[in-house]
Image (tube, rainbow, N blue to C red):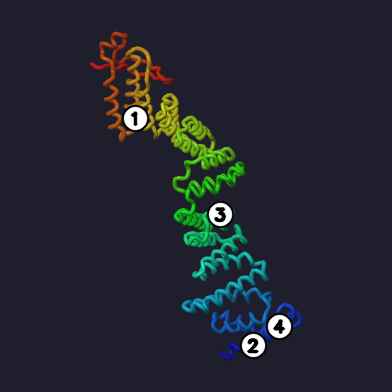
Amino acid sequence: MKKIVLLISIAAMALFSSSTLSAQGKFGPDSAECIKYLSYYTEYYKQKNYDSALPNWREAYRLCPPTARYSLLSDGTTLLKKVLQKNSKNPIYSKQLVDSIMKIYDERIQYWPKYATSSLNNKALDMYNFIKDDPQKLYEGLTEAVNELGPKARANIYLFQINTAVDLYKDGKLDPETVIGIYENAVKNIAAMTPKNDTEKRSNDKTVEDIESIFITSQVASCENLITLFTPRFEADPQNLDLAKNVVRMMGITEGCTDNDLFLKAITFMHTSEPSHVSAYNLYKLNSGRGDVDTAISYMKEAIDREDSDAVTDADYSYQLAAYSFKNGKNAEAYAAAQKALELDPSLAGKAYMLMGTIWGSVTCSGNDIEQRAKYWVAVDFMNKAKAADEALAEDANNLIRQYAAYYPQTAEAFMYDITDGQSYTVSCGGMRATTTVRTQK
């Protein structure tokens, strides 16, 4: 022990003698004592003898100005946190220690602006770790930190902020609009961050998911609240793309909040400003759900025609368009869309053929008795193709074949129109055309 003290004394004397001329300003009016205790505590600190370092650090902190050395302040927060850990069951002393730690952080930020960002981030993290019994104080501290840091804050600080805000909301101490604003700000600033690597990017993405989960489960953002909050904003600034995106994102994660005029207006403006096959498809879904058939079909056709989608996606869209058009009595459009789905993706053959057969079986044809029934030959042709392409469809296809075959003309009836079994026959009906084979009931 005597050896350690001797070494510390020698180091202090050497430091003092080498800086006598310049120390007066940097190390304060009592520069000799400042330098001595800086040296004492630093040697103990390096040896991880924190118990011996602490009283010497306290003297250095008392004697030296905050600008003397950055490590005086950064080491101080470390030492006091170690004391705090040992006294966690003493609430009065713990509170005093936390106040001291926060005070030192403020000095780090004030006197060492070079390290202000990291100091403020660390302060916010320690606030969340140590200020447990005063959520209002914690919320105010975290809010001050993120307002100052913006995208320079660590992502998890935004998570801590909204978690604290939701607790205050549940206690009736924060209104929904404030919490919604905190959520908006968190997502915006995390998106603006520049991750150092893929690991940090994945971590940030996970933090956003956690923030959204807290926000959703809090039920702060009821659809009614969102409509009340955003309607006047959007009406006042309908060309604000960022606002439109925010409306769409917020309402999109809120259950049952996409079937309203505000959401439709916002996503329509988004599509107008930044069109894509995804936004066109979303508008198809929205308008189809609202019963606006023609508008829905128009957006789906746009989604299919856009160059930013691939063939497989276009095929899926085409099949959906076929089914939707058929459901709404647009047989010719449905048939054409089903044909396109088949051309783009042969793996859809079974479904496409079955839908095409169903369309033919349902269409109303004019003309004589044979011309009216000829559609069933075409329908059966497609049902046979459907079950050949996909065995899983065989049972349903066979059931429909039996239903359609019941409407075949009698042989005698066909003879009266000069047609016989096996003869080629072209059917033109409802804007569709197909060549099939005559079949009669014996």
The secondary structure type at the circle numbered 4 is helix
Q: Earlier in the sequence, mark 1 or mark 4?
A: 4
Q: Which residue is mark 4?
A: 31
Q: Which amino acid is tagged 4?
A: Ser
Q: Which mark is residue 9?
A: 2
Q: Nearer the viewer, mark 3 or mark 1?
A: 3
| Residue under the image location 35 percent in, 21 percent down | 378
Most distant residue in the front direction: 172
Q: Which mark is residue 181?
A: 3
Q: Earlier in the sequence, mark 1 or mark 2?
A: 2
The percent position of residue 385, horizontal first and vertical second, equals 34, 27
Question: Marks 1 and 2, how far apart in space?
Answer: 94 Å
Q: Which amino acid is tagged 2?
A: Ser
Question: Marks 1 and 4, how far apart in space?
Answer: 93 Å
Q: Does residue 425 sit above or below 389 in this rendering?
A: above
> Residue 323 appears in which quarter of the rendering?
top left
Question: Marks 2 and 4, how far apart in space?
Answer: 15 Å
